[in-house]
Amino acid sequence: MSDRFLFCRPPASALLGLATLAASIHAAPAQSLPQPAVSFSSGLNLMAAPKWIFDGNTLVEEVTPAAKLQVSWPLTSHLEAAGYARTGAWTDCATSRFGSSYGFAGYLYQLGGGLRYTDFLNLGPWLESFVGLNASAGYVDRSGYSPPAPPAVRWTPLVGAEAGLQAWLTPTSGPVVTFELQRSLRPFYAPFTRTDYLARPAPQPPELYDVHFRSSPGHAALLLGWHWLLPERRPRWHTPRYSHETEPEE
């Protein structure tokens, strides 16, 4: 054979390496998907207003309780589907020449689902990170609404995002902390204006000014809870159709 075709011959060491790699891939056990899980969390529902940073009193006054029950089902080793039921609060914003203030206006009950990507930071076997996107339908409760104009909607679609950490204190359970952002895709009621007054010393008349009301579409929440793995489903044992050998007829 001509020397210019010698480069086409793979060396024996390369063939041995490929054979070893193929044997190791064939012998490696298939990784099983994570088990389904359920979690319950509760915490603080915060009002999504940039003025938190500057007005600490407003933040304290506008924290309301929130709770969430979630069931997750693995799709791949890092991706899982989740369904949840959640309760929190919705707020309205009053704006005047004196500034803006956010107030509790009622509760919001949500039912939805989404996708979650897990263990993307590789924090070790006992700590797992996750991020997710979700969508839900929310029922607007009017019981805590203070302004005279009632909400114009009963149901509203919402989209959200979450990020958090969950730890494994036992092989099947552990605490979970989640930070959430939720936003309604339509206002809870049409904006309206109300006239208010500021009392002044006599004999000066009261000073009138306008207050503009609108619903606040977004909120955040910090939740702390516990998660459990659901019992692993065991495969059924099927009895073979022909489990015994038939004896030959005489």
Image (cartoon, rainbow, N blue to C red):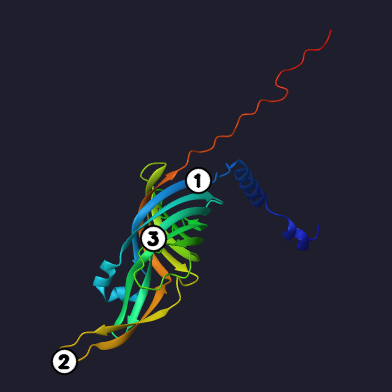
Q: Which numbered circle lies on residue 200?
A: none
Contact, mark 3 vs mark 1 (Cβ under 8 Å): no
Picture coordinates of residue 159, whole percent (x, y): 49, 65
Q: Is residue 198 above or below residue 149?
A: below
Q: Which numbered circle lies on residue 88?
A: 3
Which of discs 2 and 1 lies nearer the camera? The answer is 2
Instruction: Report the residue marked by disc 1.
Output: 36
Closer to the camera in the image, 22 or 145: 145
Disc 3 from disc 1: Cα separation? 25 Å
Amino acid on which the number 1 mark rests in the picture: Pro
Secondary element at tag 2: loop
Q: Is residue 134 above or below residue 244?
A: below
Disc 3 from disc 2: Cα separation? 47 Å
Picture coordinates of residue 116, whole percent (x, y): 50, 57
Task: Say if residue 107 shows up in the picture.
Answer: yes
Q: Is residue 218 above or below residue 127?
A: below
Residue shown at the point (60%, 44%) measured from the top left:
24
Secondary element at tag 1: loop
Disc 2 from disc 1: Cα separation? 72 Å
Instruction: Report the residue marked by disc 2.
Output: 203
Picture coordinates of residue 133, whole percent (x, y): 50, 62
* Pointer 3 or 2: first along the chain: 3
Which of discs 3 and 2 lies nearer the camera? The answer is 2
Q: Which residue occupies the extreme bottom position in the image?
A: 204
Picture coordinates of residue 238, whole percent (x, y): 65, 28
Q: Is residue 58 above or below residue 195?
A: above
Residue shown at the point (41%, 70%) measured from the top left:
150
Give the class, few, some or many, for how many residues have Cα within 10 Å of label 1's Cα (few <14, many ≥20): some
